[in-house]
Amino acid sequence: MGRITLEKVTKSFGEVEVIPPLDLTIEDGEFAVFVGPSGCGKSTLLRLIAGLEDTTSGHIRIDGEDATDLPPAKRGLAMVFQSYALYPHMSVRKNIAFPMKMAKVPEDEQNRRIEQAAKALNLTDYLDRRPGQLSGGQRQRVAIGRAIVREPAAFLFDEPLSNLDAALRVGMRLEISELHKRLATTMIYVTHDQVEAMTMADKIVVLRAGNIEQVGSPLELYKTPRNTFVAGFIGSPKMNLFEGAEADKLGAHTAGVRPEHIEVGDPASAYWSGTVGVAEHLGSDTFFHIHETGLADTITVRAPGDVDYKHGDRIGLNPRMDMIHKFDQQGLRIQ
Amino acid sequence: MSTKASRSAARLMISPAVVLLLMWMIVPLVMTVYFSFLRYNLLSPGATPWAGWENYYWFITDPSFNDAIWNTLALVGGILVITVVGGIGFALLLDRPMFGTGVIRIMVIAPFFVMPTVSALVWKNMFFNPVNGIFGNIATSLGLQPIDFFAEIPLLSIIFIVSWMWLPFATLILLTALQSLDQEQLEAAEMDGASWSSRFWYIMLPHLARAITVVILIQTIFLLSVFAEILVTTNGGPGTATTNLTYLIYVSSLLQFDVGMGSAGGVFAIILANIVAIFLMRMIGKNLDA
Amino acid sequence: MARAVSTKQKSINTAIAGTLGFLMFFPILWILILSFKTEEDAIRAPLEVLFSSGWTLDSFGAVQARSDYFKHFSNSVIISVGSTVLGLLIAIPAAWSMAFVPSRHTKNILMWMLSTKMLPPVGVLVPIYLIFRDTGLLDSRTGLTIVLTLMNLPIIVWMLYTYFKEIPGEILEAARMDGASLREEVLYVLTPMAIPGMASTMLLNIILAWNEAFWTLNLTAAKAAPLTAFIASYSSPEGLFYAKLSAASIMAIAPILIMGWFSQKQLVRGLTFGAVK
């Protein structure tokens, strides 16, 4: 079981309030991702849940019980740190055994769980090595192994993939997702990378300056961002947002359209037109960065890979009108 | 990373060190200041009446006080010049590529690990002794009159001994600092057409400035307290030729048993050291990102 | 990038540095030679000493016989190791707090601790002497151990602090998440990781305490005198017995010389309080 509830939780460092009153529920078995730009308070929020920081006010409940004043060890949570935080002087086996040793789990039970975790994480051959002798991906797996064996109520991940190179990151992302499917344990995952959030989460919590901007499933956030911040943050490449006359014409203060919802065409007959700046060819797709559209400095368009325009070419743009997002003066979605 | 629990644990864990050091600093300090205003001699037991500034007056007007101040300054200044200049030279030399760097380095820094009483006695007997010492031997074999070091140039002899012990310290610190100099800076300067001497003057020396200051300040703190080397070689003599402030206070308090006078001297020594300490603390503080 | 340097240039550097290094080291080398000579040989002219045939261990025996060398040696060991261990026990918790739970006072506390080190010993000689006289601590190993502990405590705290600072806080948090109590965290995680740093702190402090020659000379007589004071007793007239003086000196400095060579790097760190890296 691992249902985590935050009630009116706040956190201040001295005079500075980093988390204004915040309510949030994470259901048992859910994969929740806290995402937001750096300094948005997502890591602080995770550390409050872990018990590594005191809440200034409010309550944190784990499975209904008030855990606000419990020390980290008593909360039944496991955490995977950004730096992995492996104990460099212990072998992999001892690293994984450490939480069980602290909990005084019987030795044979310890060994059983270590073997099981090692097998699941492909670490069997490395159990007697020191962390210093492992690659980044392997260290990451040891950190996860150390979390698994505790059989925690919930796993907490603090930007676990940010120290890995791009290729490994995709692989580990899948592994963590599969782990979640297999264990069906609550996981809370902090990242600044919206791709990780979209691909892994059941529930995404978008944070800015300690405030929750929106909570929802990846597709909800993609389809109906509640405000311009979420609209700009979720999705890659970013949504094109623009103000002024063209937005007014659509009946909005700010309007937005995603690069994948614009088709390119003949500039003479198209809805908008502009000049191609840079064309990025990915093979499957081509991203055009287009200037002089009268909308914003640059409009990004995602076109099929075989569409070919060159720097300086005139290009026509046809947005899918049903996919245009409209926001009011305060940046809130108009529905 | 801090919770209420860890913060209170932290306060608890730091307190023994703080309390002990506080006592170590405050208790003797207050006593020294207090004694310095008493007429208090261990040889004349009984009352210890209030003396006002009397001790200070007698301590300062004592002719040996004047000598002690000059000797202290000459000692500190002389050793600083020798060790800093020599240290820069050694550091530049040891920074160059050579064979057996490790062995040569060890030979250079070894004197720092020799206890003061040993180095003083070894130099005094094996080198400075006019009859059997090595220097005397060399002079005699060249047909010269050997120098009686501690009779003719006592202060210089002590400066020499103490410099031998502290030159390794300066070398080691300056070498460490020199090795932290980005080689690309030097190569850039070379590309810009700077000769070795201008590279030394405009790049290496400014880079070393900080380390040199640290060496000067730390050594000054220690050199103000040179004691053992004087005790085992000259006992402050001949006359007061090698009596520094530290030795003078030792003489008043533990040889003449004049607690009041010794304490007044102690207050002087503390003030003198604090003037240096303020500068040193500033330098270290700047470097501390706590 | 280090540039290739011609062998000739390297040889020239080696010759110059080697000569100067040899001159610095010569006094130590010289007493090492004299300590294996007879008294008659030891006072000959330098070249004659070198080529005199007699090599003997007599001087070492004579030093022990004259004034019980091993008593002073064990005094030195007890006082320097004792004060270092005691200092570590007090300093480890303090350095832990400052490194891992810094507060806005941390910097001030560190600087203040350092400032106690700037106090000239002679400034407090009289009160310490009187306190020791009145409490019976004069000429006792306990008393000297206490003084040296307090004297070196700031250095120990500082060195440990700089070492602890290098241990990432996340690892300690991981231990906390893993259910370790504060005691277990320090015992199983922090201490093993900090052992290299603690070892070099220990080494440097033993060296400093071993060579300390103000308090050891002023607060001891026959009973608790460590080697610094023991050697001082050779001041005169025994100083003229070169072989014995050499043997006594070699025995007094050898252990520290060896330790010192191992702690070269830490020396800079410990003695400059991190101001030079």
Image: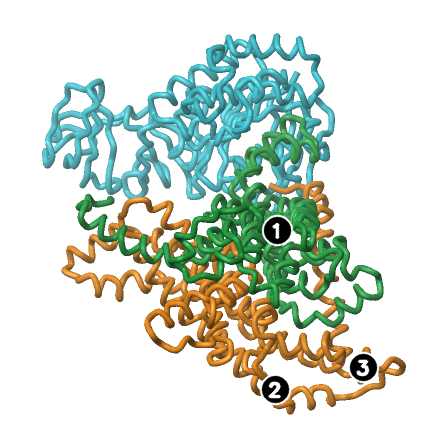
Chain colours: A cyan, B orange, C green
Measure how far apart labels 1 and 2 are at the Cα level.
39 Å
Q: Is residue C248 above or below residue C89?
A: below
Q: Chain of mark 1?
A: C
Residue at image position (55%, 75%) is: B275
Name the residue beneath numbered marker 1.
C157
Front position in the image: B163 or B52: B163
Q: Position of residue C32 (x, y in %)?
A: 48, 51
Q: Chain of mark 3?
A: B
Hey, which quadrant is residue A297 in on the image? Answer: top left
Q: Is residue A34 visible?
A: no
Q: Position of residue B38 (x, y in %)?
A: 79, 83
Q: Is residue A164 above or below residue C71?
A: above
Label 2 SS:
helix
Question: Contact (CB < 8 A) between labels 1 and 2?
Answer: no
Front position in the image: A269 or A153: A153
Residue at image position (80%, 85%) is: B39
Label 3 SS:
loop
- Residue at mark 1 shares a chain with residue at mark 3: no
Name the residue beneath numbered marker 2.
B64
Task: Give the residue type at disc 1.
Answer: Val
Q: Position of residue C195 (x, y in %)?
A: 57, 37
Q: Is residue B204 visible?
A: yes
The 10 Å Cα crowd at callout 3, few under 14, some 14 to 19, many 20 or more, is: many
Task: Please name which of the two marks, 2 or 3, marks the residue nearer to the observer.
Answer: 2
Whether residue C49 sits left or right of residue A4 in the image: it is left
Task: Give the residue type at disc 3.
Answer: Tyr
Query: Which of the numbered marks, if any, corresponds to residue B40?
Result: 3
Q: Chain of mark 2?
A: B
The 10 Å Cα crowd at callout 1, few under 14, some 14 to 19, many 20 or more, is: many
- Which of marks 3 and 2 precedes in the sequence? 3
Task: Give the residue type at disc 2.
Answer: Ser
